[in-house]
Image: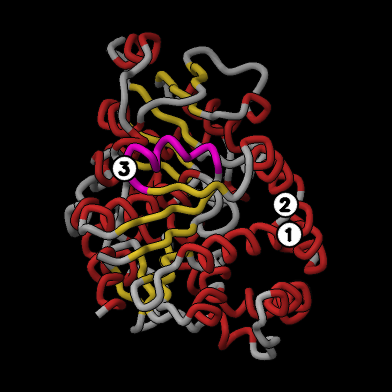
C-alpha cells in the first residue's frame, strides 16, 4: 500500500477527473491525500481520501475572478503571466504543497500524481524527496502547449520559480523545457480515437480514456427543471463550465439561438454576473443541475467545449453543439466534428441564427463514440499505471 499525493488546480473540469483517479487509487488500497481547492473538501471526503486545502473558499473565489480579468493578458502579453501568478499567490501554493509532501511522505513508498502543467510542485518533490511522479493531462492540447510553457518560464516566471527551489535546497533550472518534461509517467485521460482525430500525443503518453465523475454530476433534478423536461417540447441544455472565463457572447448567443430553434432552454451557470439580464422566452437559468441525470433527457447540449462536458455528453449519447473559445476548446470541438459527434462554430461565426441552424441539424449527428465511455475502467487503468511506479 503506497502513500499517494494527488495535486490538482483549476475548475471542476480540471479537478474532477483527477479526483476520480485518486478515488481509483484509494480503491486499489493506497493511502491517498488530495491537495486542491477548499470548496472540494466534501467531495474528496466522500471518497475516504485525505484532504489538504491549498486555499480558502474566499481565496479560490478571488482566483476565479482574477483569472477572468486577466484571461486575455495571459495569452497576449507575456509579462502579465508573472503578474497573474503573483496575484493568485501561486508561488505560495507551490510552497505549501511541497512542504506538505515533504512532511508527510514515506521514503520508498510514496508517489505524487499531479495535473499536467500546473503541478510543478510534484516535479520539485521528485527532486527533494526522490519520489516518482505522474503527470495527468485531461485534454490533448495540454501536452502540445508544453513549448509555450517553456517560453513562459524562460521569459517570465523562471526566476521566481528558482527562488522557491532555492528555499528547498534545490539548484536553479536553466533548461525549463527538459525540466517540465521530466515526469516518470505521463497519462492522458482520453481514448485513442479522440487522440487520432487531431495532433497525436507523443508515444510516451499513456491514453486511458475519459474520466467522468458520477457523484459530483448526479443528484435530484430540481422541480422546475423536471417540469421543463416533461413539457413535451424538445429541451436544450446550455452549459459554459464552472469557470468565469467565458466569452462575453457565449450565453447570450446560445440562449437566443435556442429560442429561435423553438426549443426549451435550461441554461446552467454558477455565476449570475455571466448570465444575460434578460433571457429570451423559453430559456431558464439554473445555478447548477446534475448533468448525469439531466443530459440524457435533452435533445441537445450547447456548450463551450470543455473536456468534462464533452465526456459527459458522449456518455449520455446527447448531440453536441459547441461554441468554443480559448484554451483546449476549439481543438476538442474539431476532434469531435471529425467523427461526426458534434457541430461547432468558431467565434467569428457565432450568431443566434447559426446556433439555431446547428441545433436543427444536430439530430443527424452520431451519438455513439467509436468506443464506449467507461469512466470507471479508465480511472482504474490510470491508477494501475501509477501503481507501476512503486514496483
> Within 10 angstroms of label 3, few (less than 14), some, or many (20 or more) residues?
some
Residue behind mark 2: 88
For the residues marked 3 and 1, what is the alpha-carbon distance in whole angstroms?
Answer: 31 Å
Residue behind mark 1: 85
Are circles 1 and 2 on residues that touch, CB within 8 Å? yes
Secondary structure under tag 2 reads loop
Tell us which disc is closer to us: 3 or 2: 3
Image quarter for residue 83? bottom right
> What percent of the width, then of the height, locates residue 86?
78, 58
For the residues marked 1 and 2, what is the alpha-carbon distance in whole angstroms?
Answer: 5 Å
Q: Residue shown at 61%/29% (left/top)?
A: 271
Height in image: 158 above or below 114?
A: below
Instruction: Tell me if I can see residue 200 in this picture.
Output: no
> What percent of the width, then of the height, locates residue 212?
32, 47
**Left or right placement of residue 370 versus residue 213 in this view:** left
Label 3 vs 1, first from the N-terminus:
3
> Within 10 angstroms of label 2, few (less than 14), some, or many (20 or more) residues?
some
Magenta region:
38-49
Amino acid at each position: 500500500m503506497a502513500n499517494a499525493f494527488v495535486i490538482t488546480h483549476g475548475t471542476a473540469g480540471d479537478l474532477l477527473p483527477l479526483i476520480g483517479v485518486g478515488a481509483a487509487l484509494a480503491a486499489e488500497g493506497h493511502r491517498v491525500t488530495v491537495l486542491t481547492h477548499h470548496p472540494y473538501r466534501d467531495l474528496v471526503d466522500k471518497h475516504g481520501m485525505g484532504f489538504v486545502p491549498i486555499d480558502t473558499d474566499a481565496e479560490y473565489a478571488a482566483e476565479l475572478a482574477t483569472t477572468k480579468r486577466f484571461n486575455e493578458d495571459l495569452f497576449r502579453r507575456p509579462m502579465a503571466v508573472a503578474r497573474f501568478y503573483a496575484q493568485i499567490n501561486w508561488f505560495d501554493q507551490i510552497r505549501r504543497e511541497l512542504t506538505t509532501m515533504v512532511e508527510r511522505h514515506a521514503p520508498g513508498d510514496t508517489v505524487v500524481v499531479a495535473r499536467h502543467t500546473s503541478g510543478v510542485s510534484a516535479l520539485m518533490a521528485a527532486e527533494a524527496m526522490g519520489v516518482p511522479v505522474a503527470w495527468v493531462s485531461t485534454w490533448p492540447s495540454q501536452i502540445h502547449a508544453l513549448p509555450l510553457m517553456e517560453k513562459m518560464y524562460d521569459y517570465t516566471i523562471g526566476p521566481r520559480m528558482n527562488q522557491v527551489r532555492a528555499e528547498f535546497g534545490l539548484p536553479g533550472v536553466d533548461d525549463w523545457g527538459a525540466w517540465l518534461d521530466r515526469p516518470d509517467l505521463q497519462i492522458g485521460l482520453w481514448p485513442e480515437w479522440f487522440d487520432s482525430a487531431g495532433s497525436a500525443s507523443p508515444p510516451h503518453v499513456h491514453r486511458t480514456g475519459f474520466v467522468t465523475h458520477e457523484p459530483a454530476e448526479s443528484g435530484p433534478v430540481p422541480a422546475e427543471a423536471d417540469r421543463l423536461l416533461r413539457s413535451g417540447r424538445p429541451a436544450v441544455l446550455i452549459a459554459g463550465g464552472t469557470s468565469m472565463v467565458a466569452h462575453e457572447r457565449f450565453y447570450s448567443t446560445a440562449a437566443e439561438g435556442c429560442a429561435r430553434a423553438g426549443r426549451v432552454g435550461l441554461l446552467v451557470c454558477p455565476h449570475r454576473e455571466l448570465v444575460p439580464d434578460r433571457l429570451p422566452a423559453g430559456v431558464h437559468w439554473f445555478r447548477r443541475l446534475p448533468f448525469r441525470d439531466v443530459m440524457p433527457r435533452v435533445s441537445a447540449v450547447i456548450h463551450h467545449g470543455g473536456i468534462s462536458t464533452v465526456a459527459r455528453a458522449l456518455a449520455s449519447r446527447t448531440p453536441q453543439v459547441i461554441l468554443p473559445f480559448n484554451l483546449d476548446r476549439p481543438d476538442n470541438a474539431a476532434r469531435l466534428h471529425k467523427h461526426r459527434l458534434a457541430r461547432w462554430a468558431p467565434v467569428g461565426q457565432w450568431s443566434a441564427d447559426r446556433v439555431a441552424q446547428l441545433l436543427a441539424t444536430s439530430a443527424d449527428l452520431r451519438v455513439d463514440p467509436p468506443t464506449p465511455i467507461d469512466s470507471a475502467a479508465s480511472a482504474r487503468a490510470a491508477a494501475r499505471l501509477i501503481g507501476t511506479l512503486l514496483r
